[in-house]
Amino acid sequence: MVTDREPKEDKADLILSAAQKLFGLYGAEKTSMREIADDLHMSKASLYYYFPDKENLYKAVIEKEQAEFLDTLEKDIQDNTDPAESLRRYALNRLSYFKYLVNLGRIGPASIPDFKPLIADSFKAFREKEKKIVMQILEKGESSGQFKTNNTYEVATLFLDIMRGLRSIFLNNKKLFSINDEDYKQLSHQVAAATDIFIKGLMYKE
Amino acid sequence: MVTDREPKEDKADLILSAAQKLFGLYGAEKTSMREIADDLHMSKASLYYYFPDKENLYKAVIEKEQAEFLDTLEKDIQDNTDPAESLRRYALNRLSYFKYLVNLGRIGPASIPDFKPLIADSFKAFREKEKKIVMQILEKGESSGQFKTNNTYEVATLFLDIMRGLRSIFLNNKKLFSINDEDYKQLSHQVAAATDIFIKGLMYKE
DNA sequence: AACTGACCATTTAAACAAATCGGTCAGAAA
DNA sequence: TTTCTGACCGATTTGTTTAAATGGTCAGTT
């Protein structure tokens, strides 16, 4: 028996990559299954052998990206022992992921089209995974006596919503105009400042 | 000479009120100048005697509401001496204004249409006025030694952006569905929690 | 098991006509 | 003069029809 000579990427992965590329270029709504098939020099019907429909293909692309981010995030954080520093690192990593999604066109002015239930569920699940990680950080801070949080779930939700909110405001402000590096620096600065104040708020002792 | 028997509201104010009502019912884009004129039993051309164009009429409606909010806000805050409490009261008042705007349909799912420059400027000016008020609160806290803010402008901007972000996320989450009182309670709770942590963050002492 | 061309129902795009829109203006009404 | 109006204009929006493209299926080939 011979092992694969070339790393022989799975066909489904090839489709996933092509879809990711074209979705990034034109947006999911403006990319047809025919275009994806042509890009791969295969029949459109073949796509349906690997993915039940377009929505699930899009979902798979999104979840692939989410899984990649969550992996790097967990690896980056588990090395660190100080919960305050972990929180800062989360904010930084999350911002990188945000930039990545914006550069790819996955989010931004052109992503108004209401996400259908299936995709919305993916986002929801992703946020819950994020929340779990932040909760672990908060609990570590709690048990070490550094943080004072009555309810880690609520505080984690609040922190994530604040971060999400700042990104949302940022996108709103930069609507129509393209985003340059200077804009990102401002956002980074604001996110860092918010995280710092938040951490101090958790460390406050009367 | 006889003083006005009836309080005789200015004609421009009558137009303003009718426009406010109809803009609230159908949205500014879906309300025609003809409808406003008909509602007042006057000619459409008459509207243009009092307002140069539709955009400026809409702007006047918005600025009227903004001025009302800023008035109540300043009155509510100037009585209070504790800056932390003032910040909490700002958050509360701002939330009421937000609810008012949502109930009126001024903001929400149906307000996607990009605000034209003139209106955008109104919003920008309004935010600057808000910022000034928050900065005054922060400076009071600074000079009394309760708050520690390196840069009141930046911190005020951050606080306002966090509040704005939480409202934005709230609207995103409640997209399509109508908002009930329970939802507002959740938002109020989150806004209050964020304000508390923010205040503690400003009061933190190493 | 992996893949395809031909096919279908539904959605979207294009094109054109008709209605409606915001806005103007000469002049009537007060 | 100040306030108001009907008639009118170019531009935008809307309605309608027709053609093309799209997501998805399936019998059958490789």
Image (cartoon, coloured by chain):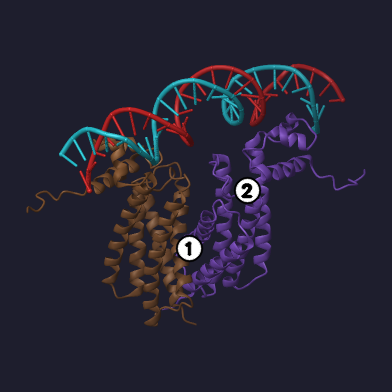
Chain colours: A purple, B brown, C cyan, D red
* Residue B102 visible, this orientation: no
- Label for residue A173? none
Near-viewer residue (C21 or D14): C21
Question: Which residue shows up at 57% across the image and 72% down it?
Answer: A84
Q: Amino acid at mark 2?
A: Arg
Q: Give the class, few, some or many, for how many residues have Cα within 10 Å of label 1's Cα (few <14, many ≥20).
A: many
Give the vertical position of B33 relative to A66 (above or below): above
Q: Label 2's element?
A: loop
Near-viewer residue (A182 or B157): A182
Question: Is the N terminus of chain B in the top left, top right, bottom left or bottom right quadrant?
Answer: bottom left
Question: Which residue shows up at 31% across the image and 58% down it?
Answer: B67
Instruction: Give x and y (percent) for residue C18.
Output: 44, 21
**Closer to us: mark 1 or mark 2?**
2
Reading the image, the residue beneath label 1 is A155
Instruction: Give x and y (percent) for residue A21.
Output: 72, 45
- Label for residue A106? 2
Q: CA distance from mark 1 to mark 2?
A: 28 Å
* Residue B189 visible, this orientation: yes
Q: Label 1's element?
A: helix
Give the vertical position of B187 relative to B78 (above or below): above
Q: Give the class, few, some or many, for how many residues have Cα within 10 Å of label 2's Cα (few <14, many ≥20).
A: many
Instruction: Give x and y (percent) for residue A185.
Output: 60, 66
Give the vertical position of B192 relative to B64 (above or below): below
Give the vertical position of A161 relative to B175 (above or below): below
Question: Which residue shows up at 28% across the image and 72% down it?
Answer: B80
Q: Is residue A176 left or right of residue B41?
A: right
For mark 1, name the chain: A
Instruction: Give x and y (percent) for residue A115.
Output: 55, 42
